[in-house]
Amino acid sequence: MLIFDGSVQADFLLVTGDAYVDHPSFGAAIIARVVEGAGFSVAVLSQPRWDGTEDFLAFQRPRLGLLVTSGNIDSMVSHYTAAKKRRSEDVYSPGGVPGKRPDRACIVYASLAKSAFPGLPVIMGGLEASLRRFAHYDFWDDRVRRSILFDAKADLIVYGMGERAIREAAARLNSGLPLDGIPGTCRASKTLPEGAAVCPSFEEVRDNKRAYAEATALQYAEHDPVRGKILAQKHGSRFLVCEKPAAPLSTREMDEVYALPFTRKPIPEADIPATREVQFSLTHNRGCFGGCHFCALAFHQGRMISTRSEESLIREAEILVEARDFKGYIHDVGGPTANMRHPSCREQQGRGMCKRNCLTPKPCPKLDTSHRDYLRLLRRLRALPGIKKVFVRSGIRFDYLMLDQSGACFAELVEHHISGQLKVAPEHCVDGVLDLMGKPRWETFLKFETLYQRLNKRAGKQQYLVPYLISSHPGSTLADAVKLAETLHRMGRRVEQVQDFYPTPGTISTCMYHTGINPLSGQPVYVPKTPREKAMQRALLQWSNSKNRGLVEAALREAGREDLIGYGKGCLIRPRGRPTADGAKRKAASPAKGEQVRHKKKLLHK
């Protein structure tokens, strides 16, 4: 039973920084329904005030414990941009209104829970707790913080996809048993567990960047449910003990989770912007073997793929068709990476995932590249009565799609499943930067773009390709940013989607940003950190925007690329003025009206 007021004592009180949306795209809802499905009652407290315990005490003391999460994303990422400016919207709050949760929400909520209900265990979960489970660099404080377990004084962290761990923890609390030894959890211990691999301590990684890089490498190497080891990291006189990851859910288990009685609506009813895109979308998988270094997925969901059955997805699609405001369009059939629907290779079940990347810098020869299962699912969904269109809007791994030798999935994706534009993420064009990102080489993207255009022409469609790019990633010099701008200019692209690199907790790229070391190789990495250089790198990728003109000129001069300031075909910007016969400067003449019209038509065509 789920409870939303204090009239009945519940077994657990779940506290979340998001508005509560009873939909399987929201982690708090999945955990609440899984615990309920295990036979326990769960009271839900969403977005409580944090100036006191009043909202907590409006509920009766839970019988077994409290479950705490910041919500679907880290609270600091929710609140601040990569430039550390406050965001004007929170898509997980009613009406998008910001300020409904505190900074570092897990720490604040755990403290309030301990004050309101002393003596009860507090279990933290979700992305914020998961990615901060070890000592970690915090971009907003610009320092290394302790494991969030110690800062929050919580009893347990459930990391990753928490269904197995939370069911086991709930059963143990109900039976009065200790919480140690549960896969997919972290706890504090006064002693070092037998057989544990030992990370450099909090004090070492705080004071020594080489030690921080070594700790990151070890944490990623052992993040595997088959071959991984228990990890221990000393904090003062105690150890953080991180059990090996929980095994991914089987297809049957995933089907059971998504068959739980979700109402698919906010409780209470409210306009939550984050629900708009997922309301009529289907999640068919978890995990990603792409291994992008700036992405937290590998350290949270893991690299092993879990999938739902086609029958489970068909049943959910039939539920969508019956919804009052469904207009015949499924917005997405995806997940972390939409086109991954089976294990990367046949060997991982017995020996776990390889420590090397499956796709980069070159695809593993053992990689299973078939897209047959995903294509069959899309075909079945679009054939259902009441379905007009089935779109794929979550990210696809374009290099993986290109490896499918039949080519059928790519062709049908273009013909049936794109809503005007396809978003992909090449991120950069310089091989050295792409290697540090864990992304495929630029030539792969060029081949993909060529084939995409050919398939669109064959299908008689005009659909656009929208590339995502990252500026100022570790390893990217000003010269690299200039090369990317040159490349985009030569291709005739005017880019709108640019993300300045954001050092979020727990990623390999964040380790590079903090330490200047690639933890996978131990080699030094150049890191653009000054606000001026970061602004110049970003401006270069949007050189055609007149607002960026000053930064672009400064960047080109600093990089020694004044050859790109001029009137030639390959120039990014024009000089501020051009010399007259007597050597004086005058304002550059505007192109003739006819030239302006032709230029506009050319841009529209592109």
Image (cartoon, helix red, strand yellow):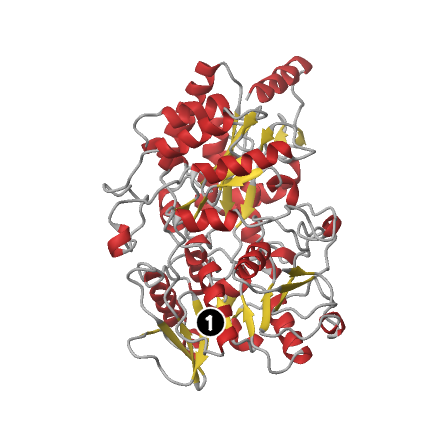
Q: Quadrant of residue 201?
A: bottom left
**Residue 591 visible in the current orientation:** yes
Horizontal and vertical percent position of residue 491: 47, 27
**Residue 145 visible in the current orientation:** no
**Left or right of 459 in this view: 124:** right
Quadrant where the C terminus is found in the figure:
top right
Horizontal and vertical percent position of residue 252: 41, 48
Amino acid tagged 1:
Ala
**Left or right of 274 in this view: 294:** left
Horizontal and vertical percent position of residue 116: 69, 78
Between 483 and 516, the one lying in front of the other is 516
**Left or right of 490 in this view: 71:** right
Which residue position holds label 1?
135
Between 387 and 513, the one lying in front of the other is 387
Rendered residue at 66%/12% (across/down)? 594
Between 317 and 460, the one lying in front of the other is 317
Outermost residue on the front side: it is 39
Horizontal and vertical percent position of residue 415: 47, 21
Between 43 and 364, the one lying in front of the other is 43
Rendered residue at 67%/49% (across/down)? 91
Q: Residues within 10 Å of mark 1 (few under 14, many from 20)?
A: many
| Secondary structure type for disc 1 | loop
Quadrant where the N terminus is found in the figure:
bottom right
Rendered residue at 28%/44% (across/down)? 345
Q: Is residue 388 above or below residue 147?
A: above
Rendered residue at 37%/58% (across/down)? 247
